[in-house]
Image (spheres, rainbow, N blue to C red):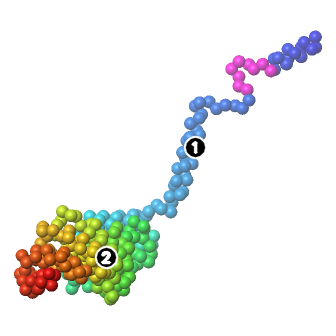
């Protein structure tokens, strides 16, 4: 009887009562909202804490807006007087904001650079030093990567205009011209001129810049394309690469202006004569007979050249 009573007691304690829960208590569905709410609150707290160093005071916000206005004005080609007005305002207010100092110097210097470009050379002599001072400060302090090409080109251009440290000026312009010049084509033309003026001339660098001019000049602009080929051929001749020069000169056709066409034919004839290509020079001189009035020495010069070739 005792054993039977113990079995009944054991069955009573081990059998779960319907509707009851066994083990760890489970949360009801209505309580589960507390978990995501807690996580959202934690993330918001961390975000506020992390952003504290970057939250701007009203003065910082006003200065940042001024720099943004100046940058947009430069990008959109606003009048240089307006840009310099923004720049002078930024110059007066920039000192407390060291974190934006490099950017401020770059934008202020760019405003003076733009004004100097649009000012007659005699009056621009007072503006280039201002541009140079700020652009040098920007380079020393370090600007963001996106501003690097424009900074280098504008700094090099300013140095070149002041005839200061010309080799370094050319180096800076070369580094920045492709992505930093407002008009890369004009930038490469300046580089060709600068390399040719060096003593001695750097013909290899001039040829490299001239090749980019050929790439950037649209063929539909017949006169500009002809001038680019004439310049490139002249550099090739100076490097004694006459065969390559002839290829460029032959591409200058009858649609080019008479002045360019005559210069091209004279260079062609010179290349042929220097390489002993007499039979190839004869039709070039014969073509020049029609423009004899525009050839130095006139018909007599051309007749002598033809006699020499024959």
* Quadrant including the C terminus: bottom left
Q: Is residue 130 above or below residue 3?
A: below
Residue located at (6% from left, 81% from top): 293
Q: Which residue carries the number 2 mark? A: 207
| Residue 243 sits in quarter | bottom left
Residue located at (75% from left, 20% from top): 16
Residue located at (68% from left, 20% from top): 19
Q: Nearer the viewer, residue 31 or 126?
A: 126
The residue most toward the front is: 310
Residue located at (34% from left, 79% from top): 204
* Quadrant including the N terminus: top right
Part of the protein shown in magenta: 14-22
Badge 2 element: helix
Badge 1 element: helix
Task: Please rate how many residues cluster around mark 1, counting C-alpha atoms within 10 Å: few if below 14, some from 14 to 19, many from 20.
Answer: few
Q: What is the magenta segment's predominant secondary structure?
A: loop
């Amino acid at each position: 009887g005792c054993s039977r009573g113990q079995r009944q007691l054991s069955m009573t304690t081990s059998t779960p009562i319907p509707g009851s829960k066994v083990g760890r208590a489970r949360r009801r569905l209505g309580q589960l909202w507390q978990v995501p709410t807690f996580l959202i609150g934690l993330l918001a707290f961390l975000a506020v804490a992390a952003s504290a160093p970057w939250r701007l005071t009203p003065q910082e916000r006003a200065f940042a807006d001024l720099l943004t206005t100046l940058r947009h004005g430069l990008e959109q080609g606003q009048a240089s007087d307006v840009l310099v007005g923004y720049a002078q305002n930024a110059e007066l207010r920039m000192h407390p904001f060291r974190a934006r100092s490099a950017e401020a110097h770059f934008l202020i210097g760019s405003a003076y650079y733009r004004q100097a470009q649009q000012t007659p050379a005699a009056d621009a002599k007072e503006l280039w030093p201002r541009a140079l001072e700020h652009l040098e400060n920007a380079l020393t302090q370090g600007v963001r990567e996106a501003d690097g090409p424009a900074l280098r080109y504008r700094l090099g251009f300013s140095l070149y205009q002041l005839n200061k440290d010309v080799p370094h000026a050319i180096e800076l312009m070369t580094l920045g011209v492709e992505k930093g010049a407002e008009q890369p084509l004009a930038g490469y033309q300046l580089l060709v001129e600068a390399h040719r003026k060096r003593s001695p001339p750097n013909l290899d660098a001039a040829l490299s810049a001239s090749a980019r001019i050929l790439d950037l000049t649209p063929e539909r602009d017949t006169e500009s394309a002809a001038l680019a080929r004439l310049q490139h051929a002249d550099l090739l001749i100076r490097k004694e690469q006459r065969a390559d020069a002839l290829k460029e000169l032959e591409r200058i056709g009858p649609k080019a202006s008479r002045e360019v066409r005559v210069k091209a034919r004279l260079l062609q004839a010179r290349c042929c004569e220097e390489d002993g290509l007499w039979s190839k020079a004869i039709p070039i001189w014969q073509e020049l007979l029609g423009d004899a009035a525009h050839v130095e020495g006139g018909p007599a010069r051309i007749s002598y050249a033809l006699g020499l070739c024959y």
